[in-house]
Image (tube, rainbow, N blue to C red):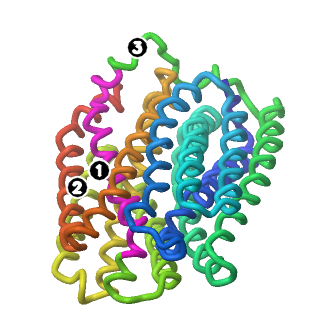
C-alpha cells in the first residue's frame, strides 16, 4: 500500500509530480496526431494510412489499460510509471530516427501500450496518497495538466515543423520524458520514505472490502452504460482533436502549420471546461447526471455547426472547441472522479484502467472512421455523426444516473 501524506508541502509536491507525469505523457503521445497532416504531406500517403499509427496507438493503449489496471492494484505504481514513461520516450526517439510509415505504425503501437502503464497507477497514487478533498483537487489539476500538454503539443509541433521538420516534434518530448521519468523515481521514493509526514494507507477512513467480485461491481455500479458513454466521449474528444487540422486545411485553405496551431485553442478552452465540470459536480453531486448535461451541450453545438461548417471558420472552430471542451469535462467526471468510489473495494487502478480503456476504444474507432467518412462522404456527414454520438452519450448518462447515485452514496 502507498503511504497517505499529511504534510501540506508533501501533498502539494505529490500533486505536482502527478501533473508533471501526465503532462509529459501527453507530449509523448499526441505529437504524432498533431503532426498527422504534415506527415501525410511529407510522406505522400493517404489520410487513412496516415491515421493508422494513431489508431494502432489507441488500440494498444486501450488493451494495455485493461492489463495495467489489474497490475496497478498489485504492483508498486512508482516502478510502473517509471518504466512506462521511459519506454514511451524511447518510442518517440525511434519514430524520429525511422521516418517510414510502416515503421512508425509499429513503434506507435508499442507507444500506446507503454502509455497505458501511466494512468491506472497514477490514480492509485492519488487515491491512496491523498485524502478525499485533496484527491478531488488533484484530479482537476491533473486534468488541467493534460490540457496544458495538448496546448504544448499543438504549439510545439508547428514550431518544430517550421524549424526543421516534424521529426523534431518527437525528439524533444522523448528527451524530456526520460528526464521526467528519473525525476519521478527519485522524488516519489523520497516522499514515501519520509515516515514523519505520512500515515499508513491501511489506516484510511474507509475500510476496504475485497470480497465483492468484479462482475458484481459492474452490475451494482451500472458500469456497462458508463463504459458505453465513455466510448462515445472518446470518439468525439480524440476524433475532433485529431482531424481538426485536416478539416481546417481542406475547408478553409490554411497552411498545415497554421491549422495545427489553430487546434491549440481546443485544450485552452478545455481548461475552463474542466473547471466548470468540477463546479457543476459540486452542485449536482452526481457524475453521470453532470456528464449527461455536458453531452447535451455537445449535441447542440454539433447541430449548430452543420449549416455553417463551410462558410464561417471562426464559428466552426468555436463550435468544435465547445464540443471537445465538454468531452474534457466528461473525462474529468467519468475517468478521474468515478474510480475513487471503488476504493472501498480495493479496485481503484482496475476500474480506472477499464474506464480509460473504453475511452480509447472510441478514440481508435474515430481516428480511422472520421478520416474514411470525410474522404468518401465529406465533412457534413462527419459532423452529422458527431450529433448522433453526443446524443447517444446523453441518453446513456440520463438513463442510469439514479442507480449510480445509490451506488456512489451508500450511506
Whole-percent x, y for residue 348 in the image: 50, 30
Q: Which residue range is magenta in the image?
A: 217-246
**Which residue is identified by label 1?**
232
Q: How far apart in space, not on screen, are marks 2 and 1 (Cα)?
A: 6 Å
Q: Residues within 10 Å of mark 1 (few under 14, many from 20)?
A: many
Can you say whether 189 is above or below 312 in the image? Answer: above
Q: Residue at x 23, y 57 (%)?
A: 390
Q: Is residue 235 magenta?
A: yes
Q: Nearer the viewer, mark 3 or mark 2?
A: 2
Q: Residue at x 66, y 51 (%)?
A: 91
Whole-percent x, y for residue 378 in the image: 22, 73
Which residue is situated farthest in the top direction here?
Answer: 211
Q: How far apart in space, not on screen, are marks 3 and 2 (Cα)?
A: 33 Å
Is 350 left or right of 228, judged from the image as shown? right
Whole-percent x, y for residue 145 in the image: 58, 59
**Which residue is identified by label 2?**
389
Can you say whether 397 is above or below 344 in the image? Answer: below
Q: Residues within 10 Å of mark 3 (few under 14, many from 20)?
A: few
**Circle nearer the N terminus (3, 1):** 3
User: Who is closer to the viewer here, 47 or 19?
Assistant: 47
**Circle nearer the N terminus (2, 1):** 1
The answer, for residue 59, to whether it is visible in the render is yes
Q: Residue at x 68, y 83 (%)?
A: 163
Q: Secondary structure beneath disc 3? A: loop
**Which residue is identified by label 3?**
212
Amino acid at each position: 500500500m502507498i503511504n497517505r501524506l499529511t504534510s501540506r508541502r508533501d501533498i502539494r509536491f505529490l500533486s505536482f509530480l502527478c501533473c508533471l507525469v501526465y503532462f509529459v505523457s501527453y507530449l509523448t503521445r499526441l505529437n504524432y496526431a498533431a503532426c498527422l497532416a504534415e506527415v501525410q504531406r511529407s510522406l505522400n500517403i493517404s489520410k487513412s494510412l496516415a491515421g493508422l499509427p494513431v489508431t494502432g496507438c489507441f488500440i494498444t493503449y486501450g488493451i494495455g489499460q485493461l492489463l495495467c489496471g489489474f497490475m496497478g492494484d498489485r504492483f508498486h505504481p512508482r516502478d510502473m510509471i517509471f518504466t512506462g514513461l521511459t519506454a514511451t520516450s524511447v518510442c518517440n526517439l525511434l519514430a524520429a530516427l525511422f521516418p517510414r510509415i510502416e515503421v512508425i505504425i509499429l513503434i506507435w503501437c508499442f507507444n500506446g501500450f507503454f502509455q497505458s502503464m501511466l494512468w491506472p497507477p497514477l490514480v492509485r497514487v492519488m487515491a491512496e496518497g491523498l485524502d478525499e478533498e485533496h484527491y478531488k483537487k488533484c484530479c482537476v489539476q491533473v486534468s488541467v495538466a493534460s490540457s496544458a500538454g495538448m496546448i504544448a503539443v499543438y504549439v510545439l509541433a508547428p514550431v518544430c515543423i517550421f524549424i526543421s521538420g516534424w521529426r523534431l516534434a518527437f525528439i524533444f518530448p522523448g528527451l524530456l520524458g526520460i528526464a521526467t521519468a528519473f525525476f519521478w523515481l527519485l522524488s516519489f521514493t523520497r516522499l514515501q520514505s519520509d515516515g514523519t509526514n505520512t500515515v499508513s494507507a491501511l489506516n484510511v477512513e474507509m475500510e476496504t472490502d475485497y470480497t465483492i467480485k468484479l462482475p458484481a461491481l459492474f452490475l451494482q455500479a451500472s458500469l456497462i452504460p458508463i463504459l458505453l458513454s465513455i466510448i462515445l466521449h472518446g470518439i468525439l474528444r480524440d476524433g475532433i482533436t485529431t482531424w481538426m487540422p485536416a478539416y481546417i486545411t481542406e475547408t478553409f485553405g490554411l497552411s498545415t502549420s497554421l491549422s495545427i496551431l489553430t487546434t491549440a485553442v481546443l485544450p485552452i478552452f478545455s481548461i475552463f471546461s474542466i473547471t466548470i465540470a468540477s463546479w457543476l459536480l459540486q452542485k449536482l453531486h452526481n457524475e453521470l447526471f453532470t456528464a449527461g448535461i455536458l453531452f447535451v451541450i455537445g449535441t447542440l453545438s454539433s447541430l449548430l455547426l452543420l449549416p455553417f461548417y463551410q462558410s464561417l471558420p471562426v464559428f466552426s472552430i468555436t463550435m468544435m472547441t465547445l464540443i471537445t471542451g465538454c468531452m474534457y469535462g466528461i473525462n474529468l467526471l467519468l475517468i478521474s472522479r468515478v474510480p475513487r468510489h471503488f476504493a472501498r473495494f480495493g479496485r481503484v487502478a482496475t476500474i480506472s484502467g477499464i474506464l480509460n480503456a473504453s475511452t480509447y476504444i472510441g478514440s481508435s474507432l474515430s481516428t480511422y472512421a472520421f478520416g474514411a467518412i470525410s474522404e468518401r462522404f465529406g465533412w457534413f456527414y462527419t459532423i452529422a455523426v458527431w450529433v448522433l454520438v453526443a446524443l447517444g452519450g446523453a441518453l446513456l448518462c440520463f438513463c442510469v444516473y439514479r442507480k449510480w447515485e445509490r451506488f456512489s452514496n451508500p450511506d
